[in-house]
Image: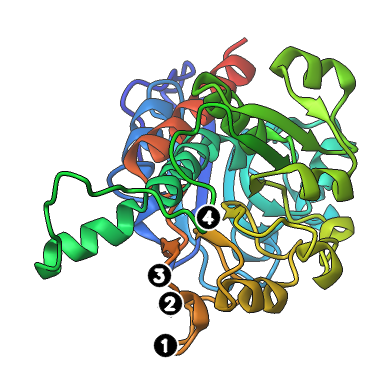
Amino acid sequence: MFATGAPKDDKGEITLKILIARQPLQDSWLTFPYFYEKAARELGEFAQVDDIVIHNPKLPLGENVDLSPYEGVVVFGVPFTEACLAQASRLRIAAGFATGEEVLQCAGIPFIELGGAFRRSVAELGIGLTLSCLRNIAMWHCRVQAGHETWIQHQFTDDPNFVNGELFGKRVGVFGLGRIGQYYAGLAKAFGADLAATDPHVSDEVFAQLGVARMELDDLLSWSQIFVIASSPTPESEGIINRERVYKLSAGSCLIVISRAWPLDMQAVRDRVAAGEICGGFDVFDVEPLPPDDVLRRAPQVTLTPHVAGRCADACRHMAEVIVEAFREELTK
């Protein structure tokens, strides 16, 4: 329990209580010291903070813990149901990654979805993967470490079989112009890339503000030298870039996957990578961890990271800041 400076009533009892409910096997990127310590300490300036470990995350939150004392709840991946809402008579705000946040929203209780806290981290790693593909950074790193480099004057980083060189002037297509896609587009724009995107849920006004052209998916695939998957895993996007569409990517183009792999026919992607037709940078995959014999592990023209784009200390601290700001505004007004 944390309550460093929480306000008290005439009886000396803390007037505001906040619950942080987390799963027992939750990764350290959501707990000590980056997120949890900062969130608990700063929320404790104006409320009592109870840290509860949820031992059965498949059960609704209200079946794991009594919600009646709490004005605020932070919940990571535990269902929140109508029954939970009925139990939480004092609840005024919630945040986290939850199933059933629509229950809260329908009741007029603000729900702070924390996925947006990772947008910078994911987008920046996406830019890193893009630059690595353009300049073969990962390959040269491995060669230098193994002592296979030649250090000759006329050595080029570029691979003429794939899009290469500077990001400036390259045609970059973004699938999904949500929070991650918008941030990636802004960074790529700063490098001087030519941006286009597809996203039926984003207004023309946002496209115009970002300086990004709107294209239909098939046209975007054919146009792009660098194609970036930055969409949320919505039901309508699953498998939308099927085998036929994967083959619309021009020979030598680059595929960057930084949000979810499920819009893609990944077998078609593997076939094109194995054939030496496209290069790419991948942080997320259809199967995790990748099997030891996966073609993506063996392909020299790809850069791989193990689903870590959002997992950095800065992103976790930012997530805590988002919660503290929202909860302080709602609970102390």
* Callout 2 touching callout 4 (CB < 8 Å): no
Viewer can see residue 301: yes
Q: Which residue is mark 3?
A: 300
Label 3 vs 1, first from the N-terminus: 1
* Callout 3 touching callout 1 (CB < 8 Å): no
Which of the pair 201/266 is nearer the observer?
A: 266
Q: Which residue is mark 1?
A: 292
Q: Residues within 10 Å of mark 1 (few under 14, many from 20)?
A: few
In front: label 4 or label 1:
4
Q: Residues within 10 Å of mark 3 (few under 14, many from 20)?
A: some
Hey, which residue is sitting farthest front in the picture? 154
Q: How is the image coloured?
A: rainbow
The amino acid type of the residue labelled 3 equals Pro
How far apart marks 2 and 3 lie (CA) works out to 8 Å
Quadrant housing residue 144: bottom left
> Which residue corresponds to the image point at 54% horizontal and 48% vertical from the top-left?
163
Label 4 vs 3, first from the N-terminus: 4
How far apart marks 4 and 3 lie (CA) works out to 12 Å
Q: Residues within 10 Å of mark 4 (few under 14, many from 20)?
A: many
The amino acid type of the residue labelled 4 equals Phe
> Which mark is on residue 244?
none
Viewer can see residue 113: no
Q: Which residue is mark 4?
A: 162
Q: Which residue is mark 2?
A: 297
> Which residue corresponds to the image point at 35% horizontal and 57% vertical from the top-left?
28
In the image, residue 38 lies at what x, y percent? 34, 34
**Quadrant for the C terminus in the image:** top right
The amino acid type of the residue labelled 1 equals Pro
In front: label 2 or label 4:
4
How far apart marks 3 and 1 lie (CA) works out to 15 Å
* Callout 1 touching callout 2 (CB < 8 Å): yes
Q: The residue tagged with tag 3: helix, strand or loop?
A: loop
